[in-house]
Amino acid sequence: MSKLAESFVEELRQAVGRDNVLTDPADRWSYGYDNSRKHNEPDAVAFAVSHDQVQRIVRACNQYRVPLVARGRGTGTTGGAIPLHAGLVLSLERMDRIIDVDPANRAMRVEPGVTNQAVQDKAAEHGFFWPPDPTSSAYCALGGNLALNAAGPRALKYGTTRENVLGLRAVIGTGDDIHAGVYTTKGVVGYDLTRLIIGSEGTLAIITEATLKLTPQPEAKRTLQAVYASVRESAAAVSRIMAQPVTPCALEFMDGAAIDMIRDYSNVVLPPAAGALLMIEVDGPEIGLDAAVESVSHAASGAGLIELKAAKTAAEIAALWTTRKALSPTLRKIAPNKLNEDVVVPVSRIPELIEGLEKLSRDFGIPIVNFGHAGNGNIHVNLLYDSQDPKQEQQARPCLSQVFDLVLELGGTLSGEHGVGREKRDYINREIDPVTLDLMWRIKQQFDPNGILNPGKIFPLNFSSEDAVSSSEG
């Protein structure tokens, strides 16, 4: 039974149409999930198709003090789209227009519900691409990419979402309309609210339009697969690769545990002594690409290298990437309850991270598999605990807590591209000092004075500005 006032629900219906408001429990149930596999049922779901409709809905939520969670397609893994306080889920999946493509200025204007893949396909028609390429690109919505500052392998060379958005149109928590950013690649008038809103996980504003910065498609691409005897030797190769002039467009890493798992659950063939693997892609003009590959290959060579394969044709490239693509389905098959964290450490400290994780795995009796974007130190740490095993169920969260402590000790950060959401909110004050966290909270209050936008996310449970200040002073 919905707890919302009937007058509020009627305002929603007037804003978006009666058929675009769901109040039946059976209809709204699925909108309480995201890819974190956690659930909390909203009191209602509304579908907007325009900026004006979003604005009307936010104003109504602000007036009635109804918690509001904006949702794309629910592919996030940290619980950012879960309505922890019930209230209203505002689905933006029907705001899926590509408004305009401007090849002369390398720009595209889109609505938040368009998929990443649709953007890539439209950009490709004009000889461009949009650099952010998360694993879920075929399905995930641009609004989610913006909310989490999504990245993917290409961020190594081309940057994250923040570096590839020129401007935004959005609605803040009061229902007011704002424009942030510029239409040019340079602009320093006022504060950079575009970069502030991107990555704020819907806690500051609801984005209704974005101007994306497009990049010309490279003429050619080469793919390399390098297999090493140990993680330390592969990490040394990563440092060498990143120190030479050619920046790869992708530099992916898998540790020995990931390799063993692929061997056990797929038909991929790798050398018996493989202790770590790098997938390396180099792109650019056809002229000079062979020399660039030679430079990267030279850097990849060295102590511990067991095998180095190169691919040029589409079929050869697909064959090499089969190894990496076999990993995620394998993990889902054997560990449906896994904890997947996307931590980041300085590249030179990857060996210490992996060695520390191996120790934690032994200490807590929980298998840990690691892979990710080695070129920028973004490692996906997977705790493969069995929720049906009472001991592992009890040990999983304490183990995760020590994983985060290890990352911070190595000068890293708790999230590279998945965000904070619900899953990491109670760890955030380990990384961010009280004064800075207090400032973030005050910024949140300026955008959303009544706290209706995605409450319960990012900030630790029961966090208050006064607590942060007293902790800093004490």
Image (spheres, grey):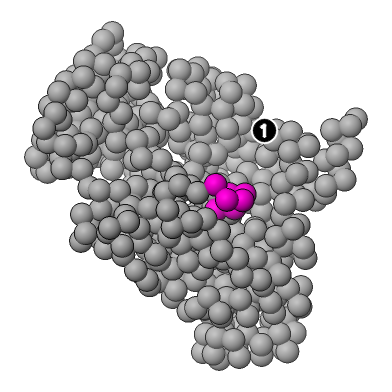
The disc labelled 1 sits on which kind of residue? Glu
Decide which of 337, 458 is in the foreground and name it.
458
- Residue 433 in percent (x, y) is at 74, 33
Instruction: Examine the residues drawn in magenta and state their main secondary structure.
Output: loop
* Residue holding disc 1: 431
Question: Dividing the picture into quarters, in which one does residue 70 lie?
Answer: bottom right
Badge 1 marks a residue whose secondary structure is: helix
**Position of residue 140 measured from the top left corner of the image (x, y, whole percent):** 40, 59
Tell me if I can see residue 78 in this picture: no
Q: Is residue 357 in view from this perspective?
A: yes
For the C terminus, which image quadrant? Answer: top right
Q: Which residues are magenta?
A: 188-194
Q: Give the percent coordinates (x, y) of residue 458.
A: 66, 49
- In the rendered image, residue 247 lying in the magenta stretch gets the answer no
Residue 45 vs 106, above or below: the answer is: below
In the image, residue 136 sits, relative to residue 367, either above or below, namely below
Picture residue at 73% right of the left edge, 73% below the top: 62
Residue 192 on the magenta segment = yes
Res 139 → quadrant = bottom left
Image quadrant containing the N terminus: bottom right
Total numbered labels: 1
64 relative position to 308: left or right:
right
Circle 1 residues within 10 Å: few <14, some 14–19, many ≥20: some
Q: Nearer the viewer, residue 235 or 397?
A: 235
Image: 344 above or below 217: above
At 31% from the left and 55% from the top, the residue drawn is 106
Percent coordinates x, y for residue 27 in the rendering:
53, 80
Instruction: Tell me what residue is drawn at x 57 percent, y 51 percent.
Output: 189
Compare residues 302 and 334 and report the one nearer the observer: 302
Q: Is residue 444 left or right of residue 316?
A: right
Q: Residue at horizontal 67%, vertical 33%?
A: 431
Q: Is residue 64 left or right of residue 29?
A: right
